[in-house]
Every structure is written in structure tokens, then in C-alpha cells.
């Protein structure tokens, strides 16, 4: 699905990623954990194609394509989806209208016909149920006046609508109460299949009680320093990140 | 030789113009002529014209003998309601006077002349139309100006919405794409007591057209007046909207949306003069400026000494899509009463890059992401337009503007 090899990246001359390597296969859920400033959100931003980062070396192959050569929208067309840590409010642009445009542009890029109004509305009804998103919210302006939880549910709703191959969830749990967390996790679990994969970026173990990862990676100082199964997340929760930092320094 | 030295820019412009064929009184003619004789084109020193230079008018090659007939059907916006077709500034052949629409004149009304361009309009008037609404049926009349010759188009319009009456007027200026005309319109609007009048003005001019228009509005008590202005294209567009709110309990709405690119220059000057108490006015002008285009906005609100309990709101917002576009926006409030609620605001910025990125991350191309955001931005103005045909027409034009 995606193969990240020895990725180095700077922002404003400061090196954030210092040789990150990660392979994700179809059907897998990978959690990336790590202390603040480790480079977690940088990774998400680079995968989605934010232009303010400078890639100094390394490569990323996604579905056989050189991801770093593609524009943000081309990545989306290939099936990459980023759930934003801070979803943007866009007054005057209705959620469903923009999703319909998005679906049609993705279909067009694949040489498929556009979605019919009927098919689209049926899909809105079906997918909004997954995240218990009020259909009124679905038709309102994108995220405008949404609560923190509603914004995150809307991210998962969009993910459900776009049906990506690889979803990158950037601290989707931040700012969520336990109910919203449960709903978001349920959405992600429902959408999981043998053909898609997700990278769940999180600071806390909490979300991983609900989204059970196949692999847990610890990102520290721009590199993955430890990989394990879900037990590793529990260990981190118990001990904090300091032992990882110490272990890395010793190693 | 001496003549050349003392010749004003108006003198030079006038050598290209044909005097009006409509009947003018000798007095009116004299007055207009003397105003023009002591005037010249406005310059930067004139505060109201600080950012708008009309010298290019004298570079236009105006063809005086433009065709009055047009084989093509009129580019109308409304399906129903009456229409007057004006081709290259002249009333289309076959138009006859009907109740509410007058196009033939024994004597052309002079009305007041504020600007030398009004004097010019009077002396070289190419068509004069009077529209009258006298019942509450909310009839709609559309004036379609089809311009396909490079010529001088000088419409003189009188719109009367009588006591208790309701009316809708669409002023639809349509220029062929490369049309290089000079439009110079003077419009006199009277809104009677308890009357309700809406005017929608579309300026879809040719890329080299100069369009200078002035609207003088008088509102009587308990009336409602709406002026929606859509400068969509043209080389230079200048609109002066002057509204005197003479009676109490009036409502006044001014909305504008503009899409500028190339070397377009658009200037909207509006004035609302609240002379009496208990009135409400609301103004919203929004536009996008691309390439080397320039937008000028000047909105004045006067609240006179005894005009208490006035609620006046004004807002102008601009989005610059290029680094070479220019915006000059100046809201002005002059308040001489003490119990009023007034606000004004002006913003100029770029499209929200974070929103563009968000939409692109969902698969929208950069172009369609920007288009969606611009449509949403201008959509706020279109929501204020209570005429479905007009708002959908302008919406379509905004889309076309981006697809070119």
C-alpha cells in the first residue's frame, strides 16, 4: 500500500524527520505514537502534500506511484485521505456539495462516470449514520459552527464517502470526549476492510482502546525508534515516553 | 491652433459624438452646454475620482452610425414580464409606448445635472425610457442593452414607482466580447410613499467598454428600495449611486458583486443620505480581483442632524486572486444625530490557503477548490437577491468567468 523509506524533511531549515521508514500493507492498522515534537503531524502533512515542507531525502511509494511527485489532489485521486487534526471551517460551501464535487473529480481522474444525484444522496444517508452525524450537519457549510466532536465526526463521514485506500488520521482523538471518541472509532472500524489501511497518529493510548492496531510505532526525534503490537501502546501509557527517550540515547 | 490649446478633453470627446435627436428645450441645452464648457475630465485631484482615470475615453474610436437592428434575439434574463430592447444605444425598431413604458418624447426632461457626464448624457442622449409602476402587482420590466458596435450609448432613464406600487426593473447591459463602446447613463429614480422598488443592474460589457453610470434615487416615507449591481466585465466601470432617503420608515438595500480580471477597472461609489429619522439601510458589496484588475469602492453614509433612530450597515469585502490586483476601499460615515446605530467594514485579503488545501486533500483540483470558495464568497451577495432569475444568471456568469 505505502512504503516510506528513509524520509528526511525540513521546515524553515529545521530538520523534523530524520530518516523515517514505514511500510503499511492492505488490511493493516498502524498506530504512530510519540511525544510532542517528534514529527507525527509533519509526517501526516507530508503524506497529504503540504508544500511548506522540504523533503531532503528519502522516498514514498503509494500504490506504485512516487507519492512525493504528486499534487495533493492527485494523491486523493489515488486513494489517500487525511483526517485533519484541525478541520477547516469553510463558510458558504455546503458539505454535501463539496463532497459531490470531490467524488466526481476523483471519478473523473479514474475515467469513471459521475455519480447520480440519487446514488449520491443514498450514500450520504448511509454514511452519515456510521458516524451518527445529523443529516442536517451533512448539508450545512463545511464545519461552520460545528463543535469539536462534530468536526471530527465530519472528517470520518468524509472518509466514509470517499472510501480511501489509505486513511491517515492525524490526532483525530484530540479534543474529543469519550462519546465522540467511541463514535469516531466505530466509524473507522466499520470502514476497515482487507483492501484498505489506516495510519492512526495519536499522542495517547486512549484511542487505541477502540481502534485496535496491528502495529504500534514510536516516533521520536524524527525516526521510528520502536515497533511493537498493541501491548506497546499500553506500556507507553504506563511508563510515559521518557524511557523511550532514554533507551534511544543509550542505544 | 489656439483652439487646440484651449480644447478640453470633453471638447475632444464631443467631436466624436452625435447630438441627440430627441427634443430638448433650449434652456436645458444651454445649461448643459455651459456646464460642459467649464468642465474637464476629472483628475486625481478630484477626491471622488482619485483612483479612477477616464482619459482612455478619448482613445475610443466611436462609430457614430451604429446599427439599430440586430438579427440576434435579445440576451434577456427574465422569461416573463415586459422588455424593451435597446440596440447600440437606440430603441429597437417596432417599440411602441404602452402603459408604464414610454420611449417617445415631445420634450426630454432635464432633471438635475450633478456631473458634467449628466450634461453630456442630456446633449447626446441616444435613448430615453420612462418606466412607471402604479399598482401593487410587482410587475417586472427588463431593459436589454445589446451592444455590438463600438459606439456611444447614452441612455436616459426615468423610473417611477408610485405611491403604494411595487415594481422590479432589470437593467441588462450586454456587450459583445471585444466591444469598445462608451456607455454613459443617467438614471432618475423616484420611489413613492409605501412603494417597493427593486432594480437589478447587470453590466456584462465588452472587454474594452467604458461604462459610466449614475443613479439618483429619491425615497418617500415608508418605502423600500433595493439596488443590486453586478459589474461582471468591461474595461472601466464606474457607478455612482446616490440615494436620498427623504421620508421616515424607509428601508434601503444596496448589494453588489463583481468579478474582475485582465486590466478591468471597476469603481462603485455609493451614497445614502439619511435626512429623516427611523430608517434602515444595509449595503453589501463583495468582489474578486484577479490578474491586473483594480477595484475601487467608496461608500458614504450621511445621517443628518435630526435623523434619529437610524440603523445603517455597510460592508465591502474583496478577495485578491493575484499579486498584481489592486483594491482601494473607503467606507465613510458622517453622523450628525446622536441616537443611531451604524457600522461599516472593509476587508481585503486572499483566499484562505488552508481551506484551499483542505478541499484539494479531498480530491478537488486547485482550480475547482478556488472556484468553490469564490462562489461561496460571492454567494452571500446573491442570497440577498430576491429575484431567482437574476441570481441564477449572475451565478452562472461567475462560473463562466472562471472557466475562461
Image (spheres, helix red, strand yellow):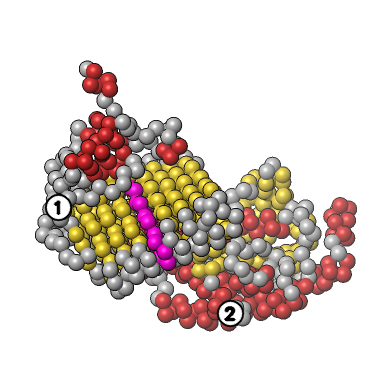
Q: Outermost residue, left direction?
A: B94
Calculate the distance from the C-alpha at mark 1 to the C-alpha at mark 2. Answer: 66 Å
> Measured along the vertical axis of the image, is residue B73 above or below residue A14?
below
Q: Outermost residue, top direction?
A: B1
Circle 1 Cα neighbour tier, 10 Å, few/some/many (<14 / 14–19 / ≥20) = few
**Residue B98: x %, y % from top left:** 17, 65
Closer to the camera in the image, B347 or B44: B44
Q: Is residue A19 left or right of residue B39?
A: right
Closer to the camera in the image, A1 or A121: A121
- The residue that appears at 62% across and 70% down in the rendered structure is A146
**Residue B152: x %, y % from top left:** 22, 43
Q: Which residue is label 2 attached to?
A: A134
Circle 2 Cα neighbour tier, 10 Å, few/some/many (<14 / 14–19 / ≥20) = few
Closer to the camera in the image, A104 or A89: A89
Whether A43 is among the magenta residues is no
Q: Which residue is label 1 attached to?
A: B106
- The residue that appears at 77% across and 73% down in the rendered structure is A206
The answer to whether residue B293 is seen in the rendering is yes
Number of marks in picture: 2
**Residue B383: x %, y % from top left:** 44, 66
The answer as to whether the residues below labels 1 and 2 share one chain is no
- The residue that appears at 83% across and 67% down in the rendered structure is A236
User: Mark 1 and 2 residues: CB-CB less than 8 Å, in contact?
Assistant: no
Q: Magenta stretch?
A: B213-232
**Disc number lying in front (1 or 2):** 1
The secondary structure that dominates the magenta segment is strand
Q: Element under label 2? A: loop
Q: Element under label 1? A: loop
Amino acid at each position: 500500500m505505502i512504503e516510506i523509506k528513509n524520509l528526511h524533511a525540513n521546515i524553515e531549515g529545521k530538520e523534523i524527520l530524520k530518516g523515517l521508514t514505514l511500510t503499511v500493507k492492505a488490511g493493516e492498522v498502524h498506530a504512530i505514537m510519540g511525544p510532542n515534537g517528534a514529527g507525527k503531524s509533519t509526517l501526516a502533512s507530508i503524506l497529504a502534500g503540504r508544500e511548506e515542507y522540504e523533503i531532503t531525502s528519502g522516498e514514498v511509494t503509494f500504490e506504485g506511484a512516487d507519492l512525493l511527485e504528486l499534487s495533493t489532489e492527485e494523491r486523493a485521486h489515488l486513494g489517500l485521505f487525511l483526517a485533519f487534526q484541525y478541520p477547516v471551517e469553510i463558510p458558504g460551501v455546503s458539505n454535501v456539495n463539496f463532497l459531490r464535487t470531490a467524488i466526481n473529480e476523483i471519478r473523473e481522474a479514474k475515467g469513471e462516470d459521475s455519480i447520480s444525484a440519487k446514488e449520491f444522496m443514498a450514500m450520504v444517508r448511509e454514511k452519515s449514520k456510521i458516524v451518527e452525524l445529523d443529516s442536517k450537519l451533512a448539508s450545512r457549510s463545511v464545519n461552520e459552527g460545528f463543535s469539536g466532536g462534530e468536526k471530527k465526526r465530519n472528517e470520518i463521514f468524509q472518509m466514509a464517502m470517499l472510501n480511501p485506500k489509505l486513511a491517515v488520521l492525524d490526532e483525530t482523538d484530540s479534543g474529543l470526549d469519550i462519546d465522540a471518541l467511541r463514535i469516531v472509532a466505530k466509524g473507522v472500524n466499520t470502514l476497515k476492510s482487507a483492501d484498505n489501511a489506516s495510519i492512526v497518529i495519536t499522542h495517547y493510548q486512549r484511542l487505541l482502546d477502540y481502534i485496535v492496531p496491528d502495529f504500534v510505532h514510536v516516533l521520536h526525534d524524527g525516526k521510528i525508534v520502536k515497533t511493537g503490537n498493541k501491548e506497546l501502546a499500553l506500556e507507553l501509557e504506563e511508563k510515559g515516553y521518557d524511557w523511550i527517550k532514554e533507551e534511544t540515547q543509550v542505544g | 491652433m489656439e483652439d487646440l490649446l484651449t480644447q478640453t478633453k470633453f471638447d475632444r470627446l464631443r467631436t466624436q459624438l452625435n447630438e441627440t435627436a430627441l427634443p430638448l428645450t433650449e434652456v436645458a441645452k444651454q445649461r448643459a452646454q455651459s456646464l460642459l464648457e467649464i468642465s474637464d475630465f476629472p483628475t486625481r485631484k478630484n477626491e471622488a475620482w482619485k483612483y479612477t482615470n477616464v482619459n482612455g475615453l478619448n482613445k475610443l474610436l466611436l462609430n457614430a452610425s451604429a446599427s439599430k437592428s440586430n438579427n440576434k434575439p435579445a440576451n434577456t434574463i427574465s422569461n416573463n414580464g415586459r422588455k424593451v430592447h435597446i440596440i447600440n444605444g437606440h430603441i429597437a425598431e417596432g417599440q411602441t409606448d404602452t402603459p408604464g413604458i414610454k420611449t417617445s418624447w415631445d420634450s426630454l426632461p432635464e432633471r438635475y445635472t450633478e456631473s458634467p457626464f449628466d450634461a453630456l448624457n442630456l446633449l447626446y442622449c441616444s435613448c430615453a425610457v420612462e418606466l412607471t409602476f402604479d399598482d401593487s402587482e410587482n410587475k417586472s420590466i427588463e431593459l436589454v442593452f445589446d451592444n455590438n458596435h463600438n459606439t456611444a450609448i447614452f441612455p436616459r432613464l426615468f423610473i417611477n414607482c408610485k405611491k403604494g406600487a411595487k415594481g422590479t426593473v432589470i437593467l441588462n447591459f450586454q456587450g459583445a466580447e471585444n466591444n469598445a463602446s462608451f456607455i454613459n447613463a443617467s438614471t432618475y429614480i423616484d420611489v413613492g410613499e409605501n412603494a417597493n422598488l427593486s432594480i437589478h443592474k447587470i453590466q456584462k460589457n465588452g472587454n474594452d467598454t467604458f461604462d459610466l453610470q449614475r443613479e439618483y434615487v429619491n425615497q418617500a416615507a415608508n418605502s423600500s428600495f433595493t439596488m443590486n449591481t453586478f459589474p461582471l466585465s468591461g474595461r472601466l466601470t464606474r457607478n455612482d449611486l446616490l440615494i436620498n432617503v427623504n421620508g421616515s420608515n424607509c428601508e434601503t438595500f444596496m448589494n453588489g458583486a463583481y468579478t474582475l480580471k485582465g486590466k478591468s477597472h471597476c469603481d462603485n461609489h455609493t451614497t445614502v443620505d439619511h435626512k429623516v429619522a427611523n430608517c434602515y439601510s444595509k449595503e453589501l458589496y463583495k468582489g474578486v480581483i484577479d490578474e491586473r484588475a483594480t477595484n475601487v469602492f467608496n461608500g458614504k453614509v450621511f445621517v443628518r442632524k435630526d435623523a434619529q433612530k437610524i440603523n445603517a450597515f455597510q460592508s465591502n469585502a474583496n478577495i485578491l486572486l493575484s499579486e498584481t490586483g489592486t483594491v482601494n476601499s473607503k467606507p465613510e460615515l458622517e453622523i450628525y444625530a446622536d441616537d443611531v446605530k451604524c457600522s461599516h467594514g472593509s476587508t481585503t485579503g486572499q483566499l484562505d490557503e488552508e481551506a484551499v488545501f483542505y478541499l484539494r486533500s479531498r480530491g478537488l483540483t486547485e482550480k475547482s477548490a478556488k472556484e468553490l470558495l469564490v462562489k461561496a464568497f460571492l454567494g452571500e451577495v446573491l442570497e440577498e437577491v430576491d429575484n431567482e432569475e437574476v441570481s441564477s444568471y449572475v451565478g452562472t456568469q461567475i462560473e463562466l468567468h472562471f472557466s475562461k
